[in-house]
Image: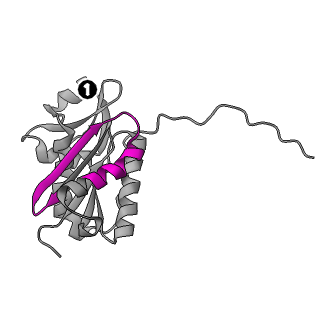
Amino acid sequence: MPSDPTILAFDTSAAHCAAALLRGGVIAVSRVEGMARGQAERLMPLLQEVLTEAGCVWADLDAIGVGIGPGNFTGIRISVSAARGLALGLGVPAVGVSGFDALIELAEAGQLPAIPAPREQVYVQLPGTGPCLLPLDEAEKHGPLYVCPDPALQIQAVARLAAKRWHSVSAPPAPLYVRPADAAPSRDVPPVLLDP
């Protein structure tokens, strides 16, 4: 087991496609592309570009790191399923890292990690409770918030945390959903089928 593993980390839980390669204990390459849609089509080419820029191939990877949310439902599913598939295909562990854990690495002491959500809300994890969704003004009552100013910093934190955790992974990553889906089943009435 290498002491300085090569970790490819990525995240699509917000309006971006982010990836970072940690090699020899340092971030060799980090890329973020802002996009509201299209992460599923862009993720694998972006990962290949990151590997190529670092002079790595897929077989060089010791583990996959992935941001598991909270955030956009579809985005979380894209990155978590890609991480699980890559881990299975490459025979390496996939390490899920929550956005809260990544932000804790970046925040100053006393700051509450907060992840932007729709409609003037934020995802937070209050001490002693699980993750929740709060209006921004209510979350601010719990102390100064830390919202990451740059997704590149957050994906680099995911890579570093995955490097610390990869040797003790016991289960594949799972999405971290804090709220129910916004989507609703179709209200269209199905057509009546007639017997021949």
Q: Farthest residue to the left: give it.
A: 109
Q: Residue 116 location, x and y as percent?
A: 27, 32
Instruction: Please say if 85 is above or below 142.
Output: below
In depth, the one of 184 and 32 nearer the eye is 32
> Helix or strand or loop: what does disc 1 sit on?
helix
Query: Does residue 166 show up?
Result: yes
Q: Is residue 125 above or below residue 3?
A: above
Q: Is residue 31 left or right of residue 134?
A: left
Tell me the residue at 18%/57% (across/down): 54
| Residue at the (41%, 45%) spot, across then down | 41
Q: Residue at x 24, y 57 (%)?
A: 51
Indicate the quadrant where residue 16 lies. Answer: top left
Residue 110 place in picture, x, y as percent = 8, 39
The amino acid pointed to by label 1 is Leu
What residue is pinned by disc 1? 136
x%, y% of residue 57? 26, 64
Q: Which residues are magenta?
A: 22-49
Q: Position of residue 79 (x, y in %)?
A: 36, 50
- Which residue is outermost to the bottom? 1
Q: Quadrant of the N terminus?
A: bottom left
Q: Nearer the viewer, residue 148 or 83?
A: 83
